[in-house]
Amino acid sequence: MGCIISCGLKLILQIFNIVLCVAFLAVALFGILLKYSKSVVQQLLSKVFDQFNIGEEDLRHLTRFIIDDADYIAIIIVAIGLALAALCLIGCIAPCCGCNMLLNIYATLLIILLVAQIIAVSVVFSNPTLLTSLIVSSLEELLKSFGDVCYGRKMPSTIWNVVMTVNPKCCGMDGWGDFDKLNKSIPAQCCNMMLDACNTKAAQNTSMPGCRDKIVKFTTDNMVTFLYASIVAILLQAALIVVVMLAICL
């Protein structure tokens, strides 16, 4: 009876890990396409964003944000996709060859990931304002490099252009004065324009609000969603660990 249960658990592990492995390989493939075939990725992103009822203008800027820094983002996506696919491959091979050592390694890696996730979730959600503060402070640091080119990229400018352009529009963290204090050119968004140059007088007349309230509201509104998603991921991983441990013991 124990042998039958063990075989059943190992079969479940194999199926589950095969599905995840294919999914993570697809993620890695997306990263490769992002690096070498931006037009294909642009079409895919347009179809994905269409499902979320994102406005055409917002869609254009979100897509541009991803495409503009495609090389940097692609490397991260490929690395994460391949690393997780390799983990799933271990989880798929271990039950098949009946090697308890591989299963132990797989279980250990899962436990390490689970503990890291639990610590991260506990730290972030123990203080509801912590995540908001981290995002705001990170964006404030990026704002200091607005318009600067780093390693051939303008990531700070790209990120802030998206933040300021996606509705509702806003300007800087606390208004156009942020750019004046940093001796930066005032972006067109501060004058409620898309292409024309913006100057101090036009920005004063427009009085475009800063993005701080929008950023805080977005983070606060989505905090519960982040928490639920994290809890689901932790529970699924814990269930997988239980299945692996039972497969080892039986």
Image (cartoon, helix red, strand yellow):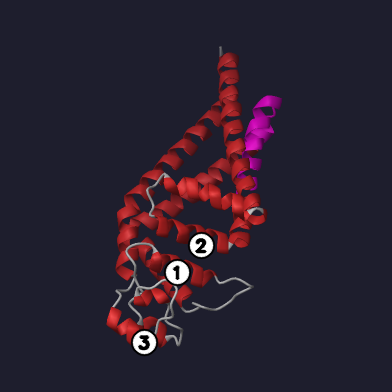
- Residue 185: % across, % down: 45, 83
Tell which circle, 1 or 2, labels the residue nearer the N-terminal end: 2
Give the amino acid at mark 3. Thr
Question: Which residue is drawn at the image coordinates 61% and 55% (left, top)?
Answer: 38
Find numbered disc 3 in the image and state the secondary structure of the residue it sits on.
Answer: helix
Whether label 3 touches label 1, CB < 8 Å: no
In the rendered image, the quadrant that contains the C terminus is top right
Look at the numbered disc 1 and give the secondary structure of its residue: helix
In reply to whether residue 19 is colored magenta, the answer given is no
The amino acid beneath tag 1 is Asn
What's the mark number on residue 65? 2
Q: Where is residue 204 shown, x and y percent of the image?
A: 30, 84
Which residue in the structure is indicated by mark 3?
200
Q: Position of residue 238 (x, y in %)?
A: 47, 37
Q: Residue at x 50, y 71 (%)?
A: 156
Q: Is residue 98 magenta?
A: yes
Does residue 197 sit above or below 78 in this rendering?
below
On the question of residue 247 being in view, the answer is yes
Circle 1 residue? 161
